[in-house]
Amino acid sequence: MKLNQITLPVKHMQVAVEFYQTLGMTLIVDTPHYARFSCPDGDSTFSLSLTEESFTNGATIYFEHEDLDGWVEQLKLKGIEFKQDPQDQRYLWREAILLDPSGNKIKLFWAGDNRLNPPWRVN
């Protein structure tokens, strides 16, 4: 099995599209109510769906980059605001936290080999 995509709800499609393009995503589908992106590396995609209903999204979306600190600095220069700068976590990942314009939580991270093979991995 392979994960195809995640779809996030958004309140303002054009603002959200511009935000994710600023993060470095490539827009591959663009309609007034739906947008889909491919990630710069690999074949992962994710999408946005316009909603007029009030929502609270409890999911956290993770985007991985080997040069996390450099990426965060580049995004800050482009006007992206962070709730947390990159920090080492007790579970051996380095993470920065931000929210998209609709309030969806995003973690930018680097975990190296610990991403799939932490010391506590089940055999």
Image (cartoon, rainbow, N blue to C red):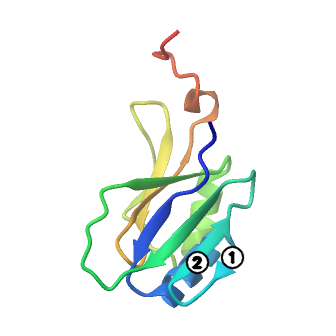
Residue matched to label 1: 27
Residue reaching furthest front?
A: 1
Q: Residue at x 59, y 46 (%)?
A: 3
Q: Residue at x 54, y 73 (%)?
A: 76
Residue 55 placed where, x, y %?
Answer: 26, 72
Question: Does 119 sit left or right of 43 as displayed?
Answer: left
In this rendering, the answer to whether 55 lies above or below 53 is: above
Secondary structure at numbered mark 1? strand
Q: Residue at x 65, y 51 (%)?
A: 65
Crowding around mark 2 (Cα neighbors within 10 Å: few <14, some 14 to 19, many 20+) is: many
Verify CB contact (< 8 Å) between mark 1 and mark 2: yes
Work out which quarter of the rendered image holds the N terminus and state it: top right
Residue 84 placed where, x, y %?
Answer: 39, 58
Answer with the quarter of the image where residue 24 lies.
bottom right
Q: Nearer the viewer, residue 109 or 46?
A: 46
Disc 1 to disc 2, C-alpha distance: 7 Å
In this rendering, the answer to whether 87 lies above or below 105 is: above
